[in-house]
Image (tube, rainbow, N blue to C red):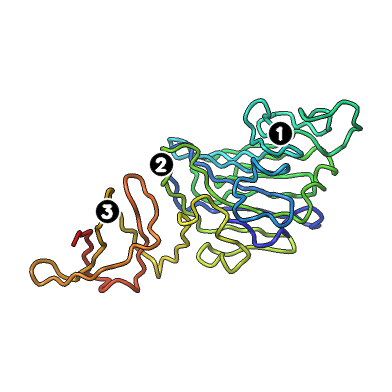
Amino acid sequence: LRTTTPQYSWVGAGAPVTYSVTVADYSKKPGMSTVFYLVPGTGLGTGDNFPDYGQPRCITGYLNNNADGSGNLRLAYKNELGGSNGQAPNDNYGNGSPSDLWPDNPAYVPGEPKKPGTGIGGTLCSVNSASILGKWSITFTSNTSVTITSPSGQTATGALPNEETAQLFADPMYAYFGTVPGEPVRIGEKVVFSEIAITGGPNQVNTDIATAMSEGLLEKSASAPTGIVFINPTENPYWFFWSLPASGYKLQQSVDLGNAAIWEDLATTGSINAPGGQRLLLSSGILSNLDKNFLRMAKP
């Protein structure tokens, strides 16, 4: 998910600005990432869904789950280094001592003058929680200072090296929120957000996820856009799963079983990958009966 316009920077806001996600459910496979990207620029296409790698400047929050259900949020940044997301030899996000003078950048050309506020970047702070469920937030309390907070209330603070660095992230700036499986074994795993919010600045997103599309977020900046589903529990209360292969099969429903059953076809448009098969969100409006209803996959 990405803001529809690049007008969501904290720089110059004059008050604390918070970027947050509230996690309602999470994959049980450890290593599933939820990401925050704060990316300066204009006219970035929605197909640019990996700005942590492709764009030269990016502040990134990495939220990861552990096998015991706990979570960790790490906040990092890079600047003037496109084509790198922290893998060696350009460990711009993982560097524990953020460096911010151009000569420290591997791309520095000897003889060029120093350019304060540009450099390789690094990790700013990290926070843990006994449970990954709940609200995770990144709050810039000034142009340079930041506090991150976990659902358990644990906090950590950090700071960009100087005001020049902060100004690199002034508007125009987009905010992204999303998930990254990281490895094929986690493709199809689900993460459920009950809220995504940007508060404190002149432009805000502060609503439950069911209506976030009308509040400044754009549902298109994803490698697998069909995998993004907004759920309003009162209208879309059910998931239906089926295994693969299912070539030629149709989803059908009936209010009865046996010889008297009348089976009606249901469209599977919008189904998404799930571990071991496919899944489809069913709205109450397409079901024949909410008290008693049978579903099947059948091949005519």
Distance, label 1 to label 2, CA atoms, is: 29 Å
The residue positioned 43% from the left and 36% from the top of the image is 68
Quarter of the picture holding the N terminus: bottom right
The x and y percentages for residue 114 are 89, 33
Look at mark 3 in the image and give the residue it sits on. 247
Residue 295 in the image: above or below residue 180 = below
Q: Amino acid at mark 3?
A: Ser
Who comes first in sequence, dot 1 or dot 2?
A: 2
Is residue 199 found left or right of 263 in the rendered image?
A: right
Quarter of the picture holding the C terminus: bottom left
Residue 184 in the image: above or below residue 19 = above
The x and y percentages for residue 47 are 59, 53
Look at mark 2 in the image and give the residue it sits on. 28
Q: Secondary structure at mark 3?
A: loop
Q: Quadrant of residue 153?
A: top right
- In the rendering, which numbered label is found on residue 122? 1
Q: Secondary structure at mark 1?
A: strand
The x and y percentages for residue 58 are 70, 44
Distance, label 3 to label 1, CA atoms, is: 49 Å
Who comes first in sequence, dot 3 or dot 2?
A: 2
The x and y percentages for residue 251 are 26, 62
Who comes first in sequence, dot 3 or dot 1?
A: 1
The residue positioned 71% from the left and 34% from the top of the image is 122
